[in-house]
Amino acid sequence: MACVSVAAFRKISTQITSVRHIFTSTKSLGAHGLTKANIRNGMKSIVMCDTKTRNCLSVPMMRDLIEDITADQNNSGVRCIVLSAEGPVFSSGHNLKELAGRGKEGCAEVFAICSTLMNSIIDAPVPVMAAVDGVAAAAGCQLVAACDLAVCTKGSTFSTPGVSWGLFCSTPGVPLARAVPRKTAAHMLFTGLPISAEVALRAGLVSSVVDEGKLDEEVAGIVESISKKSREVMALGKKFFYQQIEMDIRSAYRLGETVMVGNIGLPDGQEGLKSFAEKRKPKWKDEVPLQRA
């Protein structure tokens, strides 16, 4: 039996635990074979793998993503969902050839399915994070903006170039305008020009930017932090977060008061307060057992 050097072993371990390549016996393929999904250490990893179309959000791709996002919502072992992609393009957006081949009603179906996808991210009881290493354009940029969190590599770019092809990025602009300042959103939508990872970070489109090759490490650290929190408290908090965003500030405060009182009444809310008083780590109702590589 050949010996493996320490350096080689570490390289193999890194490849095995990569966000985009970690598929064990529990892996699953989307119904149309355009995504791969796996659950490990509190993270459900969903990888778009239609590199031939630059991971465009075709109807089959969107249906696979919706299924992947909603399939394990009641699984207490899932604390964070991470969307990533194979290849140099996170997602090129809608397939314009697909749209061109449909009538008005067919196009309406495409955009309705896309809205269902974006809403499934909001409705998920756990944080959904985009891990971008490359280009996110049009509805692909919309997908990033719709996620609760987003991390990317320094070489990544984001754009809404539909106006250049006679199709204004109206629906991509919905989450974009809610994620970045109005002038930034207008610049992207009206010019179609891409913005860099650093500009995206300053504008608030992404949560953090990392060097090439560090994306998986960054994602793992965020997922680990989230996984140590109470799932039921996280679900309650995420639901309130999106409710209050659309409210006037006084109504938001009133709802927030009610939500915090309800939070305290939860078993994990009580455990959190008790553990703080006793100066110990809380023991949540649904702990995530960590698997070491």
Image: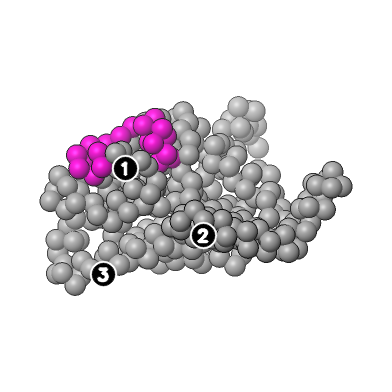
Nearer-the-camera pick, 235 or 5: 235
Nearer-the-camera pick, 216 or 292: 216
Residue positioned most to the front? 250
Q: Please give the residue where the numbered disc 2 appears in the rendered image.
A: 251
With 28 as the anchor, is 187 left or right in this view? Answer: left
As drawn, the label of residue 216 is none
Residue type indicated by callout 3: Glu
Q: Please give the residue where the numbered disc 1 appears in the rendered image.
A: 182
Q: Is residue 275 above or below residue 261?
A: above
Residue at 57%, 61% in the rendered image? 255
Magenta-colored span: 186-206
Residue 114 visible in the picture: yes
The residue mark sitting in front, 1 or 2, is 2
Q: Please give the residue where the numbered disc 3 appears in the rendered image.
A: 109
Q: Is residue 222 above or below residue 59?
A: above
Task: State the CA–CA distance, disc 1 to disc 2.
Answer: 24 Å
Q: Is residue 176 above or below residue 113?
A: above
**Residue 64: percent from the left, percent from the top?**
40, 63
